[in-house]
Image (spheres, rainbow, N blue to C red):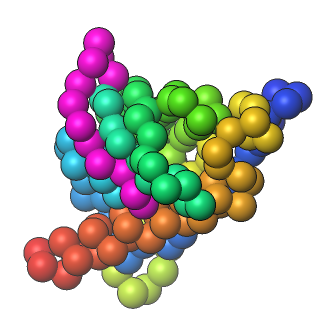
Amino acid sequence: MRPPAPGLLRTRADRRIAADPTSTALLLAGPAALELWPGVRRVGVVAGRVLVEAEIPDQRVPTAATVLVRPPRRTPTSFVTRFAWVGPSLPPTTGELTLSYAGGDAGPATTAQLVLDSEDVGSSALSAAALQVLARGFLDNLAQLAESRSRAA
């Protein structure tokens, strides 16, 4: 991923997941993947974008957002998913999640790297700290789901 353009805030979160990248990437191909984001609930689809309701930290009323999610794409060494969201009081954000094979003797594992590039964070309802918490929460939720399915297999 390229360096952020001037005026963009880059948020990065990394996590090791005790499950293989292929099965982890398959979890992102389903419609419930958006609900791995803390406080997000899928509402419907409008013009090819998913409409969600999002609870914003420190706000009493949830806000609506539209999300465009690309299915995971396989590269020679990883799976890459790209997405973008916009909504009232939210910073327009593009993101990239990369799931790579992680070495180790404990069985299959994934290194997950999430990068968000957000515009106009200062005039939005999400602070840099809130974006970091959301990014980590997403990876924690993805890890929990992937690991629970990996153990069940």
- Helix, strand or loop for the magenta stretch, by majority: strand
Is 95 located above or below residue 97 in the figure? above
Q: Residue at x 21, y 31 (%)?
A: 44
Query: Residue extending furthest left?
Result: 153
Q: Residue at x 85, y 30 (%)?
A: 7
Q: Quadrant of the N terminus?
A: top right
Whether 114 is among the magenta residues is: no
Q: Is residue 17 visible?
A: yes
The reply to whether the magenta stretch includes residue 43 is yes
Of the pair 16 and 33, the residue shown nearer to us: 33
Point out the stretch of residues depicted in magenta: 37-49
**Image x and y of residue 5, in percent:** 82, 28
- Position of residue 93 measured from the top left corner of the image (x, y, whole percent): 60, 34
Residue furthest to the right in view is 6
Q: Is residue 104 above or below residue 73?
A: below
Relative side of 44 to 104, left or right: left
Asked if residue 112 shows in the view, the reply is no
Please give left or right for residue 19 compared with residue 17 in the image.
left
Q: Residue at position x 49%, y 66% from top? A: 137
Residue shown at 25% from the left, 53% from the top: 27
